[in-house]
Amino acid sequence: MTLFGYRVPMMASLLVWCVVWEIVGRLDLVFLLPPFSDVLVAAVSLVQTPSWQIATVTTLRAFAMGMALSILVGVPLGILMGRVKIADDLLGMWVNIFSSAPLSAIVPVLMILFGFGEKTIVAAVFLFAIWIIVLDTRAGVRHISPSLVEMARSYGASRPALYTKIILWAALPEILAGIRLGLIRGVKGVVIGQLLVAIVGYGALFETFSRNFRMAEFWALTIILFAFALLIAELIERAEAKVEYYAGARQ
Amino acid sequence: MGATALRNGPSPVPAPIDSIVEVRGISKTYGNVEALRSIDLDFPRGKLTSLLGPSGCGKTTLLKIIAGLIRADGGTVAINGKHVTAPGAERAFVFQDFALMPWATVMRNVAFGLELRGTNKAEREEIARRYIAEVGLAGFEDKYPHQLSGGMRQRVGLARALSVDADVLLLDEPFSAVDEQNRRKFQEDLIRLRTNQNKTFIFVTHSIEEAVYISDRIVLLSPRPGRVSQIIEPEIDRSGDPERIHRDRHYLDTVEEIWQGLKQYVE
């Protein structure tokens, strides 16, 4: 972005919005929106409370477990669908339905299946994250140049070697893109899961803050969550940039 | 026919004394397109044989059947007298689009055939280093394919094929994705390589000049269905300066003669 000929960093626009928020908050128009400075103060004190720290550990653990599960299942499933036509015909429809369905509606069902605890949250993360990982992996495998596969075969690659030395690597840029999008959806899954279960992690905190109209803390928690989602997406993007140099070299 | 020995097919060609690859009655149909119809061919050991023909004559299909990458509908391929239907260690393939792993260095790409065979790292890198130098890429071991030009990439593909020490090298239009200057240099290098390495080359090309320039033997295929229409053995002395061949009278005559034969297939 440039302003009067000067190059303004991206963060500057964020600063403008923070100032707007501060002014609107100071005007005291809606009690839902306290001044931004209050939110920042609340954030600083919030992160020092044991209840936030415990909730963060719980949330992160459920998120990590759900993501690990969806990557471990999603990538092989995507590779299978990309390579085997029958698997693609059988599963393709379902993966597409689930990847665009309003999954929040299913979370209550998960609660019945897995109870009011961590398992439901993990299942929610898994359910939100896996489909895009499957779809992107499948697309990546589909785009592998046939001659690369022929090359491996002609030099005597066994089936396991073909998958671990060629297919997984050749599809890596798309797999990473899928994981990045999956992570963002997984954050959604963990929050929605916890909100519905409402007695664990951030869900419990959100519930407490909003029920007691503690809006500064409510917004502080929201901002922390957004920042976390952006941070991990950024980290994956860094990893993607490292492999991108060969994504372009593939035909 | 002057300096050029001509044998008119499609009748079976008398087998050369020592043929390393024997193709018998190979046919292949894609849907309702007949790509190849009962091909009988012998490839003499230690020679460079080109498969030449217009597009659609099935020359790449034939090469890939010999490589074991495509299954024929009928007929057999024998290497050193043994029937083959799958890829094997006695054949190595050079791909039209290079087929290099973009995530691996030149070194790993060249050593990949040996890696798949379970050769240990130190040994395969030593062998790979030798062939990287042989194709003129010494110093580029740690570069990635995207850092190389098209010509250099194909040299990597060639080094990979050489390093597995196969008896037969199968080259599928290896220079078609390489620019003209590099192609000339590459062809000269191939002539030199052929005299150094005691290997049999089967070379697919659609360029008449290229085929005549480098081949001991040219198999002309006619399209729809693909059949052997003619076998030509250009008698060109390649011992001296490779540049000279382009002005050689036999070279020019053979190119002209093949062109006259192929003209009918060009719309």
Image: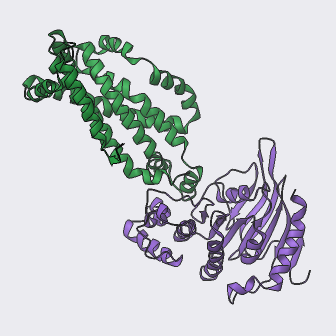
B172 to B5, vertically: above or below: above
Tell me the shade of chain B.
purple
Position in image of residue B59 (x %, y %) = 75, 59
Residue under the point 33% across and 28% down: A186
Confirm whether residue B13 shows in the render: no
- Picture quarter containing residue A9? top left
| Front residue of B138 and A235 | A235
Left/right placement of residue B243 relative to residue B149 reads: right
The letter of the green chain is: A
The quadrant of the image that shows the N terminus of chain A is top left
Position in image of residue B83 (x %, y %) = 68, 59
- Picture quarter containing residue A101? top left
Residue under the point 53% across and 55% down: A152
Residue under the point 47% across and 57% down: B102
Residue under the point 26% across and 21% down: A119
Left/right placement of residue B235 relative to residue B131 reads: right
A160 to B264, vertically: above or below: above
Confirm whether residue A44 shows in the render: yes
Q: How is the image coloured?
A: by chain
Of all residues, the one furthest to the front in this rendering is: A4
| Front residue of A128 and A245 | A245
Position in image of residue A60 (x %, y %) = 22, 30
